[in-house]
Image (spheres, rainbow, N blue to C red):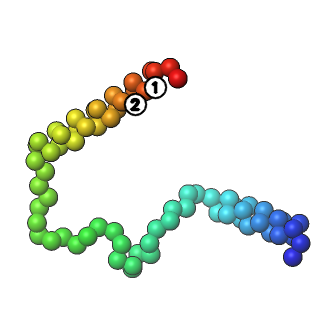
Amino acid sequence: MSFEQEWAQLKADALARQAEGGMRLNQLPADSGGGAPAASGKDLVAKADSINGNANLLVEIAGCFTRAARTPS
């Protein structure tokens, strides 16, 4: 197959995919067992101090980014 033939085939394949439209997402087949784990009967418990600690860390990280953005290079 020559380059021109291969290039024409690749362009035709790309146009066919565009004609299908929509967004394609990579995902597992429905029967493969992916997704949410089965319920174990235990409730998820989140303590206020761990949530507050994570929020404080995110605020600190955001502050680092904003300071870096304002600092001339």
- Which residue occupies the foreground of this view, 16 or 42? 42
Question: Measured along the vertical axis of the image, is residue 18 above or below residue 5?
Answer: above
For badge 2, the amino acid type reads Phe
**Disc 1 target residue:** 69
Q: Residue at x 67, y 63 (%)?
A: 17
Residue 25 x/y as whole percent: 51, 62
62 left or right of 51 in image? right
Residue 16, visible in the rendered structure: yes
Q: Are marks 1 and 2 in contact (CB under 8 Å)?
A: yes
Label 1: which secondary element: helix
Q: Quadrant of the N terminus?
A: bottom right
Question: On the image, which quarter does residue 40 sit in?
Answer: bottom left
Residue positioned 40% across, 26% down in the render: 66
User: For the residues marked 1 and 2, what is the alpha-carbon distance in whole angstroms?
Assistant: 6 Å
Mark 1 is on which residue type? Answer: Ala
Residue drawn at the location 41% of the way across and 75% of the way down: 30
Residue occupied by mark 2: 65
Q: Residues within 10 Å of mark 2 (few under 14, many from 20)?
A: few
Q: Residue 27: x and y, percent? A: 46, 68
The x, y position of residue 60, in whole percent, is 28, 32
Report the front residue among 7 and 22.
Answer: 7
